Image (cartoon, rainbow, N blue to C red):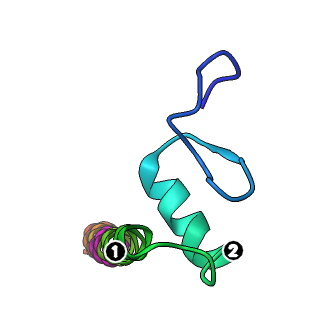
Amino acid sequence: MLDDDPPVARCPYCKRPFASERSCALHLGEKHPDEWTADEETAYEEATEDEEHELWMYHVKVIIALAVIYGVIVVIYMIILG
């Protein structure tokens, strides 16, 4: 979020600004779980699931990238020795 961009969401309890609704929902679950409403709890659960999925996809991409790098190194090594 740039300094001149208005916040997309604001915490209803501590008034902290957020760049996205998802960030606000995650904040509510971490900082205000005793105060939130049922809708806010649902939003937190959805945001957590989305974040877990994105993290899982990131890990898959890292593993694929490492496998490709390893394969390229092996091929280069075989060419040099070959």
The residue sitting at 69% across, 74% down in the picture is 31
Q: Residue at x 46, y 72 (%)?
A: 37
Judged from the image, the secondary structure of the residue bearing numbered disc 1 is helix
Q: Which mark is residue 17?
A: none
> Could you say whether the residue bearing mark 2 is in a helix, strand or loop?
helix
The number of numbered badges drawn on the structure is 2
Residue annotated with mark 1 = 42
* Magenta stretch: dominant secondary structure: helix
Quadrant of the image occupied by residue 42: bottom left
Q: Magenta residues?
A: 56-65
Q: Quadrant of residue 52?
A: bottom left
Task: Point out residue 11 in the picture as x, y percentages from the top left corner.
Answer: 62, 53
Contact between labelled residues 1 and 2, with CB atoms less than 8 Å apart: no
> Residue 66 placed where, x, y %?
37, 74
Of 31 and 75, nearer the camera is 31
Nearer-N-terminus badge (2/1): 2
Residue hosting label 2? 31
Q: Residues within 10 Å of mark 2 (few under 14, many from 20)?
A: few
Q: Residues within 10 Å of mark 1 (few under 14, many from 20)?
A: some
- At label 1, which amino acid type do we have? Thr
Residue at the extreme bottom of the image, as rendered: 34
> Quick one: quadrant of the C terminus?
bottom left
Q: Residue at x 32, y 67 (%)?
A: 65
Disc 2 residue type?
Lys
On whether residue 22 falls in the magenta region, the answer is: no
Question: Is residue 18 depicted above or below 40 in this figure?
Answer: above
